Amino acid sequence: MTAIASQDRPAEPGSLPLRMRLAAAGLDGVTLLVLPAALGLVLLFVYPFLYGLVLSFEPKVGGALANYERFFSDPYFSNTIGTTMWIALPVTILNLLLAIPIAFRVRLMRRQRLLTTILVLPITLGTVLVAEGMLFYFGPQGWFNRALMTIGLISSPVRLVHNYWGVVISLVITGFPFTFLLTLSYITGIDPSLEQAAATLGAKPASRFRHIFWPLLLPGLAITFCLSFVQAYSVFPSAVLVGEPAAATRVISIAAYQAAFEDYDYSMASAVAMVMAATQLVVVLLVFAGRSLVYRGPVATGKG
Amino acid sequence: MNLAVKAATPQSGRSPDSRAEASRPPAFKELRLDGVRRDFGAVNALRDLTLTIRRGQFVALLGPSGCGKSTALNCIAGLLPVTGGSIRLDDKRIDTLRTEERGFGMVFQNYALFPHMTVRRNVGFGLKMRGVPTAQAEKRIDEALRLVHLTDHGHKLPGQLSGGQQQRVAIARAIVIEPPLVLMDEPLSNLDAKLRLEMRQEIRRIHGQLGSTTIYVTHDQEEALSLADRIVVLRDGVIRQVGTPAELYGAPAHLDVADFMGYRNRINGRLVGNAGGLAQVDIGGGTLEGAPRGELKGETAVVAVRPDDLVPARPGQAGIAATVEAIEYRGREFHGVARSAAGAELHFASSAPLGVGSPVSLTANKDQVLVFPPEDK
């Protein structure tokens, strides 16, 4: 705003005031508003990250790479990557597969807000509350098993907590709202007249999804996938509370926690954290590489 | 050039054989809407719409916003289910069919081009859905693009085209499937004035060249008058008048249709005479004479006259006494606003600039004046 106002003032020919030259380069008073966030980012993310990175190369014993050598040579550590992936990837995909059809239906509903509120509620509960609820509900004496046994569907309780499935269920419950909200916003962003146009051209619902919605949705789904995946990948509370933290759900964050607070080896913990960051970055980059191959332009029509 | 001239001739004189090479819209005789209703909750967007559209016609649905014209089009396209009545294509009932089963071409107000597909793939989409073999489809896409003069733009994405080009892609996409019926929903409303005129000619040319049947929704009477063979004027979900452009322009049946057809002066007055096909109305400060429309009874009537037909009286000629309130230059003549002695606002045309505040005596030829019953609804 100041930049525009200052242009009204007559400037001496030849030499523009510094302020106007800066404004022309995109720097004006408004730019300063970025500072608090930038500062916060440096203090809370960049510095700790770099500190941890350096720390990971200063192991208690051995050379600079000793921590990483230990991580990848000791299955107790290296297996956590697979364990975490084995939880995070299916959960993310499952959340997406659930979110897409529901969002497609909700998009057409008049009382969207009510349903959205109900679906989003779990996000406000927090992982611990959900885990607690699951322990009672899905436990051997919980309603779930008792109900199934009463109607004779099963003869002995199904184990759905303190194992792999407990973590998966917990992550679906807490992760779904987030995935759903993102998916819904991407789906409602697609101009409904595109589907109508496809219908007038003879496309049946399946074709309309395949040729119109799916390609336009894909870039958004890729981003949704990445954000949901990163959330699931850093699972910690539910892996401990409703999982089997010693074996099937010994995820990478547990390894980092143990290194830091049970072995008091901050250097090793930092190395684990770095591996964690690197591995999820690989997945994110792969998804984005795939995303770059598809259409990513506007999803509304030209000049509507 | 030749084609454009030919296309401008009314449909009645055109034989089906004169249609351009490859395009053969499936033969049907007429589309019949019979008592079609559409309610949105308690709101009747469309009430008892009965209309027959014959093959080859260019029909415009004209009306102010909210009159139900788009609703009617969407019902025909199948994008909105009807809540009553039936739509038949000859003897086949189609209002129960899904949109994709009707196979009508539709051009949307916002074009609705698939943003992720090239122009060619957009145009070819309908053919692909119909399983037309690739070689044949390519040929038809070429033809359609040639028809809309976009041959060199086939590889582009819609986002890279101008508004007018996008509009033409939308038309090509709708006609390439050779639909029995082409539906257009205010297709020109997003274009600027110059482009709108050009595209108007294009649409008329394409309609003529293909011999297709077109239903065109618009709120612009000029567009309707210049494009259509037949105009259907809608208001509040009800048909007010159906007729050729000349009929509607010269002899609107109702006051609101007259309003739409440019009769900007609608002056309430006292009916002082009605005999021999001429009615006289005293509007205060003078009397206007014109053809009665509708049943005139009672003491009051409304006189409708276009601003262009209300002119200053010659010396000695009787006229309505009024005072000039504003005058503006319109190129060939002046457009003025005057206030009659009775307080009515009169829009008139004048060849000379008149001073604001000066008295003026206005008159109109009785052939250009219509007299309606009051509060005709």
Image (spheres, coloured by chain):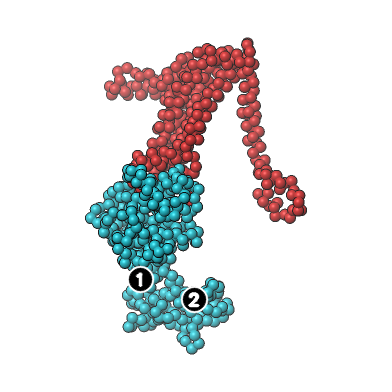
Chain colours: A red, B cyan
Disc 2 chain ID: B
Q: Amino acid at mark 2?
A: Phe
Q: Amino acid at mark 1?
A: Glu
Disc 1 chain ID: B
Q: Of residues B25 and A17, which is closer to you in this image?
A: B25
In 3D space, how far apart are the residues under numbered discs 2 and 1 (Cα atoms)? 23 Å
On the image, the x and y values in percent for residue A301 come to: 46, 48
- The residue where tag 1 is placed is B247
Answer left or right for A184 relative to B82: right
- The residue where tag 2 is placed is B348
Q: Residue at x 50, y 61 (%)?
A: B194
User: Could you say whether the residue bearing mark 1 is in a helix, strand or loop?
Assistant: helix
Marks 2 and 1 on same chain: yes
| Crowd rating for badge 2 (residues with CA inside 10 Å; few <14, some 14–19, many 20+) | many
**Outermost residue, left direction?**
B91
Q: Of residues A55 and B200, which is closer to you in this image?
A: B200
Marks 2, 1: nearer the viewer: 1
Q: Residue at x 40, y 64 (%)?
A: B2
On the image, the x and y values in percent for residue B198 come to: 46, 61
On the image, the x and y values in percent for residue B116 come to: 45, 43
Q: Of residues B108 and A182, which is closer to you in this image?
A: B108
